[in-house]
Amino acid sequence: THFGFETVTEGEKRERVAGVFTSVAESYDRMNDLMSFGWHRVWKDHFVASLNPGFSPLTAGPDPRGPQHILDIAGGTGDIAFRMLRTAHELNGNTDVRVTISDINRAMLTVGKQRAESLPASQQAALSFVEANAENLTQTRPLHAYPSPLEPTTHDAHGNSEQAFFDPATATGGIPSASVDLYTVAFGIRNFSNIPAALREAHRVLKPGGVFACLEFSKATRFPVFNALYKEWSFRAIPLIGQLVAADRDSYQYLVESIERFPSQGEFRDMIVDAGFVVAGQGYEDLTGGVAAIHKGMKP
Ligand code: SAM
């Protein structure tokens, strides 16, 4: 395998993930549709509806209509953040909801920033972009700190230009503890080198009563025949589509393998509990027979 099941160090994994997302950033949205038959849109819609930003008493503190700060980690090209804003501002009429999109990869964020230009001005104003590693949110950089993010430069392992990713002179000082009402991460966490560290950071930045919510590929093992077909599709078709459409077989091969390696629904729920969160019931919801799952936890 390319990035396969061999043991890799945290640093190696980080470099590979950086390479993958820098290389797929431009084709990312189109490829998502092709690979999932458009299902990722349905899952994302359901994820956001289930959190009901701007209204839910679950995620909004004592006043459900009050201000809310949502941190969308590994937010990439903005799919979750834009849905959050639309639901909060338009459906729930709560314009006091602001969203921070955070990602380690500037190429993905740059595509997100361009897409955000077609949002209503009030939603654009409620949106900010920061570069950060989810495993250490004490150090962040605003995306606009760079004169021209699209300008070709030499890139480090994170796909970011060489001039100091965490330059103390321009760093914003990170996401403060207990400052976030809702932490979301969609199709991101399986790429993290150190998932327990990211969960600890999620716990740190959330206010007491704040919610951690994760949408991620999972295990469809409950229905063996469906699972066999799904595996065929993932391991054979997805790398091939990646090769044909994005001329990048390796990146899509990596994506498939990273799904295979990610813990099962129950194992991941236990990791969330170990990080100090309280979960309701079994702690997760299967989507499409477990192809994806939503996990939620509350910081007590
Ligand atoms: N959330 C978006 C969505 O659902 O469309 C983007 C998901 S994309 C599959 C995964 C994202 O995770 C990429 O943008 C990648 O740069 C980001 N990522 C990977 N490792 C990260 C890390 N350690 N910290 C923050 N973001 C990371």
Image: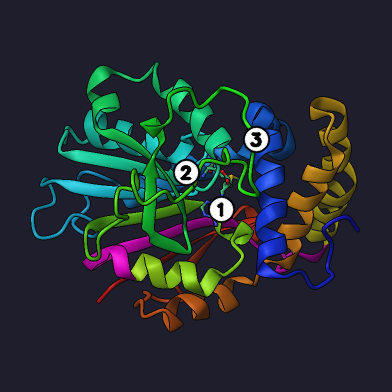
Which residue corresponds to mark 3?
154
Give coordinates of residue 57: x percent, y percent. Answer: 18, 57
Whole-percent x and y of residue 112? 48, 30
Residue 109 pos. (x, y %): 49, 35
Q: Amino acid at mark 2?
A: Gly
Image coloring type: rainbow
Mark 1: is the Cβ under 8 angstroms from ligand 1? yes
Q: Is residue 159 left or right of residue 19?
A: left
Task: Identify the residue shown where x is 72% and y is 53%.
Answer: 16
Ligand 1 contact, mark 3 (Cβ < 8 Å): no
Q: Residue at x 23, y 31 (%)?
A: 89
**Residue 224 or residue 81, whichever sits in front:** 81
Q: Is residue 22 magenta?
A: no
Residue 149 versus residue 273: which sits nearer the camera? Answer: 149
Residue 279's place in the image compared with 44, above or below, is below
Q: What's the CA distance linking mark 3 and mark 1?
A: 25 Å
**Nearest-to-viewer mark from 2 and 3:** 3
Tell which of 110 and 288 is nearer to you.
110
Q: Secondary structure at mark 1?
A: loop
Query: Gap between marks 2 and 3, in whole Å?
Result: 24 Å
Q: Which label number is shown at residue 75?
A: 2
The range drawn in magenta is 204-224
